[in-house]
Image (cartoon, rainbow, N blue to C red):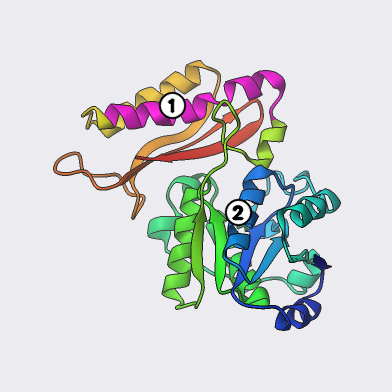
Amino acid sequence: MQVIHHIPALRQALAAQPQPRVLVPTMGNLHEGHLSLVRQARALGGTTVASIFVNRLQFLPHEDFDTYPRTLEADCDKLRSAGCDIVFAPSEAELYPEPQTYRVQPDPALADLLEGAFRPGFFTGVCTVVMKLFQCVQPSHAVFGQKDYQQLEVIRRMVRQFAMPIEIVAGATCRAGDGLALSSRNQYLDPAARQAAVQLSQALRSLATQVQQGARDFRSLEESAMAQLGREGWEPDYLTVRRRDTLLPPAADGLLPPLVALGAARIGGARLIDNLEF
Ligand code: PAF
């Protein structure tokens, strides 16, 4: 496995590697969830490339950019064992040698909802760095985890809108034994918060079950799910049932389209997100 920090060296190394070229973009601090994406990439054959870059553009000023765990050496060990061929780990000076004043502005109808409403500019930061990583790596495929459900949809639309010749592949969410979705931010949880953290996925499961059993007053279902989490010590940003295709609220009458329950909430200083298709 080659670990490459510079764009020209990356391009040179990639020229000699077989297709398909599959990129797994990450911000490092890798856990089993990331490694399952790498194994999924590996299964497509050709060349597996993982990028590791903590992207300043997608953090709000009060967020954890400075403290986000940077664990390059341990990450490379894990990627090597998962069968990755090339790690692209640029510095900020390499990826943003001048202020990144050109940005990719995703469709606000999708990107200003949910995560975008609570983290303004987040998806502009994500799309800008992903576009740039795509330019550096020129992958034929890119794998994104379904845990970041809205991110996956935003990237899919970006690729479609710009006619980028890249197939976006969704990777299933990996969960701990109790059902908590794996996330680098889980390490911010103290033992009590870690024990309670599964309540987020349970709340989503309960929302889905109520809808499957015929409940259609989505607003009141969502309000009571948020109130319940609040009583358990969480600060929920949203818990909601949405159409999978647009992430807009479904109509309460008629046949239901494919749905997804999505949630974001804080507990013990960590902000967790999760989702459940149903
Ligand atoms: O999901 C992530 O880890 C990041 O948002 C990504 C896609 C690597 C862009 O920085």
- Looking at the image, residue 254 sits to the left or right of residue 147; the answer is left
Q: Could you say which quadrant of the image residue 250 lies in?
A: top left
Q: Residue at x 14, y 43 (%)?
A: 254
Magenta residue span? 189-211
Q: Secondary structure at mark 1?
A: helix
Based on the picture, tell me whether residue 227 belongs to the magenta stretch.
Answer: no
Task: Give the residue type that dot 1 points to.
Answer: Ala
Q: Residue at x 47, y 68 (%)?
A: 158
Which quadrant: the C terminus? Answer: top left
- What secondary structure is the magenta-colored segment mainly? helix
**Residue under label 2:** 37
Q: Could you say which quadrant of the image residue 143 lies in?
A: bottom right
Whether 272 is drawn above or below 12: the answer is above
Q: Residue furthest left?
A: 254
Quadrant in which ligand 1 is drawn? bottom right
Q: Could you say which quadrant of the image residue 13 lies in?
A: bottom right
**Residue under label 1:** 203
Q: Nearer the viewer, residue 211 or 24?
A: 24
Task: Give the residue type that dot 2 points to.
Answer: Leu
Q: Residue at x 34, y 32 (%)?
A: 208
How many numbered discs sit on the rendered protein?
2
